[in-house]
């Protein structure tokens, strides 16, 4: 299981890339990985090609997973205690270390996010 930050970042990317398509990868660099939905919609007051889904951004002491479905549809997610410990704010997870159990919970959360976006016509 991933122990250093580069491995954690790669693992998180893999969890999201498993859903591409339908998710669209907008950015894929060492400093920023970002993806969105594939259905034109309103995001706030702005019309976008796809609703923002998630970003992965490395920081010196952790990897940040910005996960938008938990912000737009909080009722759809029941977080485990280990995931709650990583959550800072409404939709940002600070991941310093990851074991098999946490990795599985994050993967399930991402899978659930894809399902929520599909149910709400934000993904085809």
Image (spheres, grey):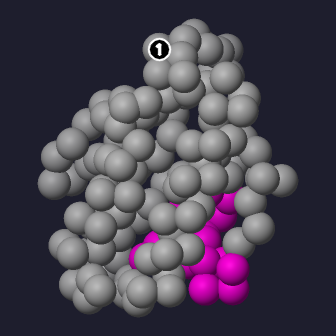
- Corner quadrant of residue 34: top left
Q: Position of residue 97 (x, y in %)?
A: 37, 87
Q: Is residue 24 left or right of residue 73?
A: left
Q: What residue appears at the point 63 percent right and 32 percent down from the top-left corner?
A: 118
Q: Quadrant of residue 45?
A: top right
Residue that mark 1 sits on: 49
Relative to residue 41, is residue 34 drawn left or right? Answer: left
Q: Position of residue 122 (x, y in %)?
A: 61, 25
Image x and y of residue 1, in percent: 29, 86
Please determine whether, in this image, residue 61 is positioned above or below residue 17.
Answer: below
Judged from the image, the secondary structure of the residue bearing numbered disc 1 is loop
Q: Which residues are magenta?
A: 80-95
Name the residue rendered at 42%, 34% in the picture: 23
Q: Residue at x 21, y 42 (%)?
A: 28
Residue in the foreground of this view, choosing between 50 and 21: 21
Identify whether 95 is placed above or below 108: below
């Amino acid at each position: 299981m991933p122990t250093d930050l580069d491995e954690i970042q790669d693992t998180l990317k893999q969890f999201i890339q498993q859903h591409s398509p339908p998710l669209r990868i907008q950015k894929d660099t060492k400093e920023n990985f970002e993806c969105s939905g594939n259905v034109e919609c309103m995001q706030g007051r702005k019309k976008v090609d796809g609703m923002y889904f998630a970003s992965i951004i490395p920081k010196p002491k952790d990897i940040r997973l910005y996960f938008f479905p938990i912000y737009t549809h909080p009722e759809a997610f029941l977080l485990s205690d280990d995931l709650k410990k990583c959550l800072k704010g409404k939709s940002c997870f600070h991941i310093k270390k990851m074991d098999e159990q946490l990795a599985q919970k994050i993967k399930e959360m991402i899978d659930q996010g894809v399902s929520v976006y599909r149910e709400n016509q934000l993904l085809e």
